[in-house]
Image (cartoon, grey):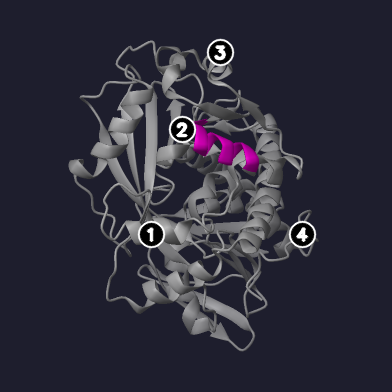
Amino acid sequence: MKVLVLGGGIVGVTTAYMLAEDGHEVTVIEREAAVARGTSYANAGLMAPGHAYAWSSPQAPGIMFKSLYRGDQAIRFKPKLDPRLWAWTWLFLRQCNAEAARVNSLRKHRLCVFSQEVFRALKATTPLAFDGREGGLLYLYRSQESFERGAANTQLLTDDGQALEIIDRERAAEIDPALTPVKERIAGAIYAPTDESGDARLFTEALAERAAARGVTLATGTTVQRIEAAGDRIAGVETDKGRHEADAYVLALGCWSPALAKPLGLKLPIYPIKGYSVTLPSGGNRRRPSIGGVDEDNLLAYAPLGDRLRVTAIAEFAGFDSSHKPADFAGMLKALRSLFPEGGDWDRPTYWAGLRPMTPAGTPILGRGRQANLFLNCGHGHMGWTMACGTARITADLVAGRTPEVDLEGLTFN
């Protein structure tokens, strides 16, 4: 079967690879000059089933409101004359209650656990260089109040089978000796021993090479302009380089999926939520973190990636604006430096901002579209790296007519 995958980020490339494993003739359409140049380019790097909590929590509305007059909030709402922003925000706020947060978190967790299993199976059979690191992740709390709240929240995921340990500052410093000089700044931590990290861009590039070796065509530098439907099927895709036709089509274009899906009768609730990222060279420092984690009080994620340290923060409701300036990163760098004062070469930061394709519930949209040969694999939000391999396997199963191993309740459009 000929399959056209729209999108060359980590989601699209993993999907193409698994489709090729099933023996399909696969082409990937990607508007950038290379794969993984969008949201996958410089994300947090954490593969974190142990942190699969919904962003749409009861606390989120208060944080968003404070962001209107305070610039230090991790979730920032920037009002714009954009009807899509207001419509999406309304749907998001409707999810910000305890019961919805519980259900959405469990759905995310179920998918993340499955995806990590697929990811590990792939690594075992397909050697890939991506600065991967096992050994778990640390979720750090600066205040006793936030630590107690975080410890209480773990029950949701531990009851669902996730390995999580509630630890004191001494144990956190044993797990990651880089924290020893600053351990008094930590009230406690949650240790997720099975979580891991790695560079999503390097992984995507390496897997794209493997996919090409299996016969996958990577049509980079090609922009999708229109998806053409004929009756109950997709007939073809128009691009700036010409028309493509296939037997099946996979929509994996992240934030750009809704615009192309709308003429097909699909109103996908996906909106870009901006995140900021800094990458620091090691500079020969020996006090770099040995594993990744999250500074929970600042919602700051960090990960050692080879000889680099990656840090990401902020969820900004700012539309399709990915611009940034050095001053935007000052707060997150200050917070990181207070934990790892010798964590990297602070004089040589590389700045980046990307757009997370978020749904109000925080779960991706999978399954079939309105047309029988259109398959959806989009809206992964801030956990695309964690979820990609799992949603790729689910999509490949659906294309092949197999029943996925994961219950898709709450994860489909219909």
Q: Is residue 132 visible?
A: no
> Label 1 amino acid?
Met
Label 4, secondary structure: give it: loop
Q: Is residue 279 visible?
A: yes
Label 1, secondary structure: give it: helix
Label 3, secondary structure: give it: helix
Q: Is residue 12 above or below residue 1?
A: above
Q: Position of residue 18 (x, y in %)?
A: 65, 50
Q: Which residue is mark 3?
A: 174
Instruction: Magenta stretch: give its range.
Output: 140-152
Badge count: 4
Q: Residues within 10 Å of mark 1 (few under 14, many from 20)?
A: many
Image quadrant holding the N terminus, namely: bottom right
Q: Is residue 236 above or below residue 26?
A: below
Q: Which residue is mark 1?
A: 64
Can residue 145 be found in the magenta stretch? yes
Where residue 32 sits, quadrant-wise, is: bottom left
Q: Nearer the viewer, mark 3 or mark 4?
A: 3
Which residue is painted at 71% across and 36% down in the image?
A: 121
> Label 4 amino acid?
Asp
> Label 3 amino acid?
Glu
Q: CA distance from mark 4 to mark 2?
A: 38 Å
Q: Position of residue 117 (x, y in %)?
A: 71, 39
Q: Which mark is residue 143?
A: 2
Q: Residues within 10 Å of mark 3 (few under 14, many from 20)?
A: few
Q: CA distance from mark 3 to mark 4?
A: 38 Å
Q: Which residue is mark 4?
A: 407
Which residue is painted at 48% across and 60% down in the image?
A: 358
Which residue is painted at 54% across and 52% down in the image?
A: 11
Q: CA distance from mark 1 to mark 4?
A: 32 Å
